[in-house]
Amino acid sequence: MKTRVIPVEPKSPQPDVLQQACEILRRGGLVAFPTDTLYALGANALDPAAIERVLTVKGRHHGKPLSVLVPSVEAAAALAATLPDGTQALMRAFWPGALTVVVRASAKIPSILTAATGTVGLRMPAGAVARALLAAFAGPVIGTSANKTGAADPADAKTVQKAIGGQIDLVLDGGRVALGVPSTVIDCTAEPARILREGAISRAALQAKIALV
C-alpha cells in the first residue's frame, strides 16, 4: 500500500482535504492526523474491521483497549453508559485538551475497541485539524498514537511515515504538534478516580477538580 501524504493548514484546515480524509474513514480506512498532543491513528471507532486494522498496524494485542476522540461533551455522553458528576467536572475543566477520561462504555461501542473491559477512554482534543476532522466526520474516531506500540511518540508526520508508512491510507501533515506528549488518562470508573497514565495534565491540576487515589 502507498500512503498518501497531504499537507494541511494547522490553524485553518482545508475543507476539501478534510473531506478526503472523511471518505477514507467512512470506508474503513486509516488516517493519521495531528492533534494537540501527538499524531493520532484515526479510524471509525464503530467499525470493528477498521479497529482490527489499527491493532494490526500498531502491533497491539487485543487485550489493550483503544481511546476515542469526540467533538463534544454531548458526543461523549452518547458513547458512555453514564457520566458521573466528577467526570463531567473534569470535562468542563480540561476539554478540549489533553485529558482522556475512562468511563463505562455504552452498548454501541464494539467489544474489540474496549478489549472486552466494558470501559472506553474518551477525549475531546484541542487543535484545529483534529477538531475540524471530527466535526466533518460527525462520528467518533479512534485516537491512539500513530506509531508502533512502544515506539517513539509521533510528534510530526515524518515520524509517522517512518513508523507506519505503507500500512495506512493517508497522513495529514500539519507540521509538528503543539505539545508532543501524550494525554493524561484518568480512570473515572474507580472511586476515587485514579490516574492510569501521567501526561500533559498534572496530578495537581486534576486534584484541584476531583479526588484521586
Image (cartoon, grey):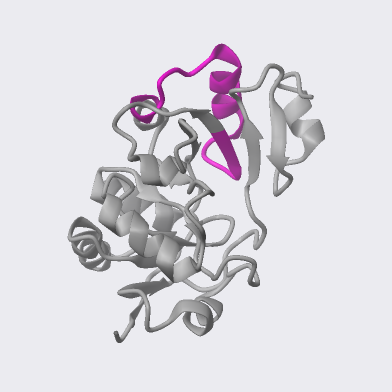
| Magenta-colored stretch includes residue 85 | yes
Vertical placement of residue 191 versus 197, above or below: above
Task: Work out whether residue 11 can be spotted.
Answer: no
Q: Which of 63 and 199 is in front in this view?
A: 63
Instruction: Decide which of 104, 182 is in the foreground and name it.
Output: 104
Residue drawn at 42 percent across, 29 percent down: 105
Q: Residue furthest top?
A: 85
Q: Examine the rendered structure and indicate whether residue 135 appears above or below residue 128.
A: above
- Quadrant location, the N terminus: bottom left
Direction from residue 130 to residue 147 in the image, left or right: right
- Side of 69 where 203 appears, left or right: right
Residue at x 65% of width, y 72% of height: 152
What range is drawn magenta here?
A: 77-101
Q: Is residue 210 covered in magenta?
A: no
Question: Which residue is at the front of the view, 213 or 110?
Answer: 110
Residue lying at 70% horizontally and 48% vertically, measured from the top left = 200
Residue 79 in picture, x, y percent from top left: 36, 30
Answer whether residue 48 is visible to the viewer in this image.
yes
Quarter where residue 97 is shown: top right
Q: At 57% from the left edge and 22% from the top edge, which residue is drawn?
A: 87
